[in-house]
Amino acid sequence: MNELRNVLEYLPYSIQETIQKKINEKLENELNEIRLRTDKPLILKFPKEDLILEHIVKQEEVLKSFEKICENSVYSYKRQICDGYITIRGGNRVGIVGSAVVENGQVININYISSLNFRIAREKIGCSDNMIKQIINYETNSIYNTLIISPPGGGKTTLLRDIVRNLSNGFEDFKGKTIGVVDERGEIAAMYKGIPQNNVGIRTDVIDNMPKPEAMRILVRSMCPDIIACDEIGSKEDADAIDYAMCSGVKGIFTAHGGSIEEVKKNPELSKLFNKNVFERIILSQGRSLATNLTFDIWCRFCFVTKEEFMEILRYILLIIIFSLSTAIGLMLSKMYENRVIELKEFKNILNFIKTKIKFTYEPLAEIFKQIAESQATKTSIIFDKMVEQIKYKQAKVVWENCIQEADISINQEDKDVLKKLGKLLGQTDVEGQISEIEVTENFLDMQIEKAEEERKKNQKLYKTLGIVTGLVLVIILL
């Protein structure tokens, strides 16, 4: 596999040869770590057991590997060395330990390298496919703020990486989002010389080797992300940066160490975020290693209240829904009276437009209907879209009457009958005849508009009030 080959090239030939003799293709796919300890046996770490080889690692082999990792330029990797790891090609990471040089409480170098731990990176493309829709808010084409929880080695970073890939690329019913990844330890994107070694999607910007709080603020200010992804939050500075991002309108996906929500809430800084209801979805990852399938549970925000509190919240939500529904019905009925007046006036303007076109430009009805459909963005203009299609193979009279009758708008049947009368001679007489018929219809429309205005004044306020009062009465009864 490519993952192992990318690691072997950093090892001395003697160690490469030893490993290749001992593992087959199946074991190669399950290999997690290669451990080099000075004057100790070479150890290959698998999910269920360690394979201890007879090869004793020499100090010069450790140093030779270290030089390869640093590309014979140790000085250029000084910061990563002080952090205890270096990311190499393929997204693999090498842990480094030895004698630390400390100055003013800070590690400024590591001398006498004694152990190297080659951690083999394995992406699990698609591991988030079964749960990704649970954290998406389809109404806003965004996500719910999400926290992934698992113990160390439980697969939370693997899951986070694949969620980022999915959200960045987009998929059916979800448009891809701009994502800013805070990759402090290089485990998510695994940047190598500015190139992500892992697939984190086409709309993803990565900032690595920087403390999480500073990185989050820089991403918000400079890259305008829709979503920020960050691994292993927990400090006060992390919590403050998350607050800053949320207040800037950015959504977030984060991970934290823990076996349950209760364990995570023992962290005082994370507990504050829980109390502020920052996290809208909780994923409890139960994977045991990168070589096993990930399983998880997804919790919504209501998981943080007791059953009794939840039922009380649900009761109030139902009361709000009942009141809102009653009020909305009243508003909808009152709006119908207002819409009828508006639509009748729109039809009068349309008739005037048709009259002008017939009188001065002599354009055919199909072209006039097309111009009406294209020039207005109203419900009445939709009727003329249908007319344009039907007039190609039907008489203008039939098209006009059918489309007016079938129109799903607020005018009543009496209004439709007035408009349909125009269709009897539409397109069948000379210019003067057409204009005369249109003017007669306009006069009838004026009378219908006057009636509609009277009904609106009489009933609009009544239905609004009735909807609100009915809602209040129902809420009082159910309380």
Image: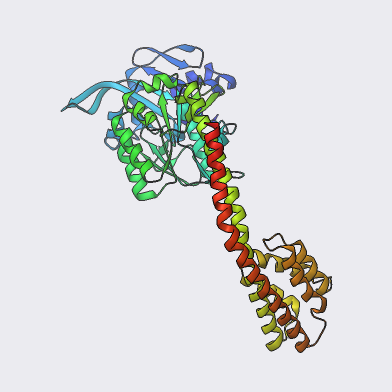
Residue 429's quadrant in the figure?
bottom right
Extreme residue toward the left, this view = 104
In this rendering, the answer to whether 60 lies above or below 386 is above
Residue at horizontal 50 percent and vertical 19 percent from the top:
288
Residue 109, percent from left and from top = 23, 28
**Residue 305 in view in this figure:** yes
Q: Is residue 320 left or right of residue 220?
A: right
In this rendering, the answer to whether 157 lies above or below 307 is below
Viewer-proximal residue among 455 and 250 = 455
Residue 215's quadrant in the figure?
top left
Residue 17, percent from left and from top = 48, 21
Residue 39, percent from left and from top = 34, 13
Q: Is residue 133 left or right of residue 432?
A: left
Residue at horizontal 34 percent and vertical 49 percent from the top:
221
- Looking at the picture, the colour scheme in use is rainbow
Residue 102's quadrant in the figure?
top left
In this rendering, the answer to whether 372 lies above or below 478 is below
Q: Is residue 368 left or right of residue 23?
A: right
**Residue 135 in view in this figure:** no
